[in-house]
């Protein structure tokens, strides 16, 4: 009892990131992200904007996994190939065939870049602690495994149909570029939400403007 009381006192004295990390570990120990969302357990008591930012970032990282894994992009790509095979329009068939390598690369890059972005966020904003719940970690791993198999299968048949394989070097370069963009986007969205929640709508808009109008603004690092 005395130990429990001391732990309670220690926990009550935690602030900011330490308090959020304790909440995160307890929430992760109770189950997956779906379980957490459905449970209605008491939310974290947020007392400052930085904690609000980190809390929003945790939810965004896990929510991004939900979004990407809910998309049947691999199945749609397979149906796309079947439609091309059945097409009678030779000109359209040739044009669309030429787009296949770039389309496939974008599918593979999307998942790998998101995983890389989240791991960087863990290191830079959560002292190396994993922000993903167990079910979201499993989902992104399975998704990237499926997309990698599709990539390797394409590389095996590409020479037979007159296409060049998708080399790992250029693909990883694309992953790095996309991951950096994803990090900036998730940080901006999370910090803008926290800023708006604490009443500074103008600052929130300034953070979101490079995302809303990417062609008319200079997008710098939002990792502040």
Image: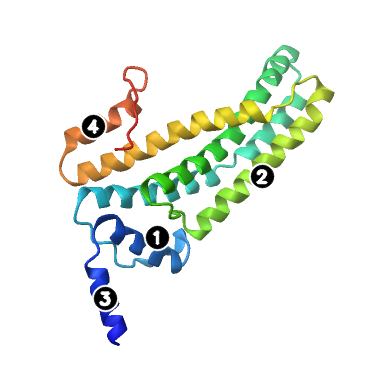
- The answer to whether residue 38 shows anywhere in this view is no
Residue 140 vs 73, above or below: the answer is below
Q: Which residue is mark 3?
A: 8
> What is the C-alpha distance between the residues marked 1 and 3?
25 Å
Residue neighbourhood size for the residue with mark 2, other residues' Cα within 10 Å, grouped as few (<14), some (14–19), many (≥20): few
Whichever of callouts 1 and 3 sits on the residue coming sooner in the sequence is 3
Q: Is residue 167 left or right of residue 9?
A: right
Residue at 63 percent across and 36 percent down: it is 76
Q: Residue furthest bottom?
A: 1
Contact, mark 2 vs mark 4 (Cβ under 8 Å): no
- The quarter of the rendered structure image containing the N terminus is bottom left
> What is the C-alpha distance between the residues marked 1 and 2?
27 Å
> What is the C-alpha distance between the residues marked 1 and 4?
28 Å
- Counting labels gives 4
* Residue 55 in the image, given as x and y percentages of width and height: 32, 52
| Closest to the observer, 86 or 159 | 159
Whichever of callouts 2 and 3 sits on the residue coming sooner in the sequence is 3
The local secondary structure at tag 2 comes to helix
| Closest to the observer, 222 or 72 | 222
Query: Which is in the foreground here, disc 1 or disc 2?
Result: 2
Residue 90 vs 192, above or below: the answer is above
* Residue 191 in the image, given as x and y percentages of width and height: 28, 41
Contact, mark 1 vs mark 4 (Cβ under 8 Å): no
Q: Which residue is mark 2?
A: 146
Q: Which residue is mark 4?
A: 205
- The answer to whether residue 54 shows anywhere in this view is yes
* Residue 145 in the image, given as x and y percentages of width and height: 65, 46
């Amino acid at each position: 009892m005395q130990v429990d009381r001391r732990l309670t006192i220690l926990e009550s004295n935690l602030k900011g990131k330490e308090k959020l990390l304790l909440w995160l570990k307890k929430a992760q120990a109770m189950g997956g992200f779906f379980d957490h969302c459905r449970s209605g357990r008491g939310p974290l008591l947020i007392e400052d904007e930085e904690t609000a930012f980190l809390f929003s970032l945790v939810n965004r990282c896990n929510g991004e996994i939900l979004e990407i894994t809910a998309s049947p992009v691999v199945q749609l790509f397979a149906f796309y190939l079947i439609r091309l095979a059945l097409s009678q329009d030779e000109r359209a068939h040739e044009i669309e065939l030429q787009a296949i390598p770039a389309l496939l690369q974008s599918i593979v890059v999307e998942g790998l870049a998101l995983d890389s972005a989240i791991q960087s966020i863990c290191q830079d904003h959560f002292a190396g602690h994993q922000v993903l719940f167990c079910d979201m970690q499993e989902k992104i791993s399975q998704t990237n495994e499926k997309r990698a198999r599709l990539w390797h299968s394409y590389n095996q048949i590409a020479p037979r149909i007159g296409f060049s394989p998708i080399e790992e070097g250029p693909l990883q370069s694309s992953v790095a570029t996309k991951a950096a963009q994803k990090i900036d986007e998730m940080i901006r969205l999370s910090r803008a939400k926290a800023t708006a929640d604490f009443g500074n709508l103008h600052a929130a808009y300034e953070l979101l403007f490079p995302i809303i109008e990417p062609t008319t603004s200079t997008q710098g690092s939002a990792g502040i």
